[in-house]
Image (cartoon, rainbow, N blue to C red):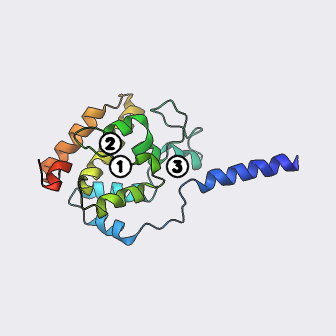
Amino acid sequence: MKNCYNQLRAQQRSIITNQASSSFQPPRRLWNAIWKLHTMPKLRSFLWSLCNNALATRENLYKRHILPNPACCICANQVPETPEHLFLFCPWTRDVWNHPALAIRSPIMAVHRIEIWLLQFIDSKGNLPTLETITSVLWHIWKARNAFLFRKQQPKTDQVVHVAITEAQSRGIFNTPVSRSGSK
């Protein structure tokens, strides 16, 4: 009995060490970049909430004993709806990031924290969209997820990308990877 208990505890510890830690402190340059974004204040607040794991994801609601199951409601993979899963790993959101209009070819599956993934856009000197564009896409992923959850509207990759880019272009903040590098 004791041996079985010790094995289960060791397994649980290995799962916990592979998850995002609440003691992680994102670099100050991330917070500075978020608050300096040329976008609506609600999008800055949304991004701040995302980086602080303060969104009402199913995993967070489960931890607060509000939901009985933390599994993603969109995909059938029965994985917890963490911020990383919802915004990067869920099959439909991977299609968003791989959309030709965005052309983000970063190794998303290697990401363990969404804040670290966002830092690559802040530190980027190359062919990546602006942080404002990424924020717009994240916001529209969140809105599509909520439309699915509350109105049963299936999320559509093309629609999310189109609306996010149109919104970014209307504010003059959308830079395609091609135009950022200066060549066409």
Residue reaching furthest to the right: 1
Per the image, label 2 sits on a secondary structure element best described as helix
What is the distance, in whole Å, between disc 1 and disc 2 at their CAs? 9 Å
Q: Residue 84 appears at what percent x and percent y?
A: 45, 48
The residue sitting at 70% across, 49% down in the picture is: 11
Q: Residue 125 appears at what percent x and percent y?
A: 24, 62
Asked whether, in this view, residue 20 is left or right of residue 1, the answer is left
Residue placed under numbered mark 1 in the picture: 106
**Circle nearer the N terminus (1, 2):** 2
Asked whether, in this view, residue 173 is left or right of residue 109, the answer is left
Closest to the camera, between mark 2 and mark 3, is 2
Per the image, label 3 sits on a secondary structure element best described as helix
Res 12 visible: yes
Q: Amino acid at mark 1?
A: Ser
User: Against 77, is 104 above or below?
Assistant: below
Closest to the camera, between mark 1 and mark 2, is 1
**Circle nearer the N terminus (3, 1):** 3
Q: Quadrant of residue 37?
A: bottom left
Per the image, label 1 sits on a secondary structure element best described as loop
Res 176 visible: no
Circle 2 residues within 10 Å: few <14, some 14–19, many ≥20: many
Closest to the camera, between mark 3 and mark 1, is 1
Residue placed under numbered mark 2 in the picture: 97
Viewer-proximal residue among 159 and 120: 120
